[in-house]
Image (cartoon, helix red, strand yellow):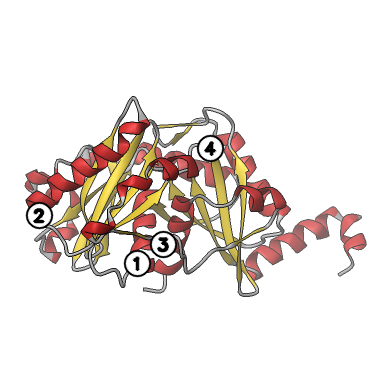
Amino acid sequence: MSPSFLATNPQLQSLWFGLRRLIQTRRVLVVVSDQRLVCCWENRGQWLWRSGSLPPDSIRDGLPLQRDAMAELLAELLLDCDVMGAQLELVLPIQGSHWRVLDGVAPEQLKNFTELLATTTDLNWPLDSEDSYLAIAPCADQMLLVGCPRSLLQAWIDVVEMADLPLRRVDWLVSSAQRGLVLEQQELPGDLAWVFADASSYRLVVLRDGVPELDCFIRLSNNDDLVLELRRRVAAWQALSGASPQLAWCLCLSQELLTRLEPLIDPDRGETSCGAEVSWIPMAVTADDEAQGLQALERLALQGMREDIYR
């Protein structure tokens, strides 16, 4: 059908785009941070990505405050890239969601999350189970509980609906990035200390055999103290759990912080760093995105979402 003919026939144009959305369905992974949206999709065997900056102060504690503007941005990003038939898989921001490892929980207990939280007192679950969205995911030989307030999830559902797009799946930035990290480092022989920024603090997650056994927030007035604080937290955890033969550090931080943290990794203790060599990097669509690049946490979350459907 001729493009010029479509341009002069609005009804046929609408029908044509509607048919393309039905026929050309494709997965679109969307990662949300407090600064931007990152959309990622596959085209002819190549994964592509495009980002769009969010309005200032548009997210608070993971909740979208300017839903109309965010929906418009999401729709325009996909339209500009001619991504038709998008089936969205949304990764929620860091803030507002929580996770816990379910240790020793029988499968039959998973049928009723509310009862499980009421009877499992050592979880220290911060959300009201009656007013939260909960999901269970496999994590090595254990299970992972992930949840967020229902109001937060509904707000993001509203954003996607305003963009006139179907939502097929929802996950959380930290849990999705954790899967991506485990996928890339599955041959790692020891423990993994994972560090990333979380709003006004830093976050240290220690993984043993792919399972997050420590998750703590670190708030500092001076970033020069970060090396000492990270070493203190890891040493305390190792004293309780028993030291691993090796410890690898994965630092998802800015280049400025990476330079400051060079003294952190101690090769005399058998410590190494990981993340320099990555198995998968999607290609940026625009020159601006190419120059800015994907943040390490964004890329890991996309990796976790991309691969998880095939498990």
Between the residue at mark 1 and the residue at mark 3, the CA separation in whole angstroms equals 12 Å
As drawn, the label of residue 264 is none
Q: Earlier in the sequence, mark 4 or mark 3?
A: 4
Give the residue number, with chain letter if any, for mark 3.
Answer: 304
Q: Is 220 located above or below residue 81 in the figure?
A: above
Among numbered discs 2 and 3, the one appearing first in the sequence: 2
Q: Earlier in the sequence, mark 4 or mark 2?
A: 4
Kind of residue at badge 4? Gln
Q: Tag 1: Cα neighbours inside 10 Å, few (<14), some, or many (≥20)?
A: some
Q: Which numbered mark, 2 or 3, is in the foreground of this view?
A: 2
Kindly report the distance in space between the C-alpha atoms of the residues bearing marks 4 and 3.
21 Å
Kind of residue at disc 2? Ser
Q: Which residue is mark 1?
A: 185
Q: Label 3 near label 2: C-beta < 8 Å?
A: no
Q: Which mark is residue 241?
A: 2
Q: Are marks 4 and 3 in contact (CB under 8 Å)?
A: no
The one of 261 and 35 positioned closer to us in this rendering: 261
Q: Amino acid at mark 1?
A: Gln
Please provide percent x and percent y for residue 154.
42, 41
Location of mark 4 (residue): 35
In front: label 1 or label 4? 1
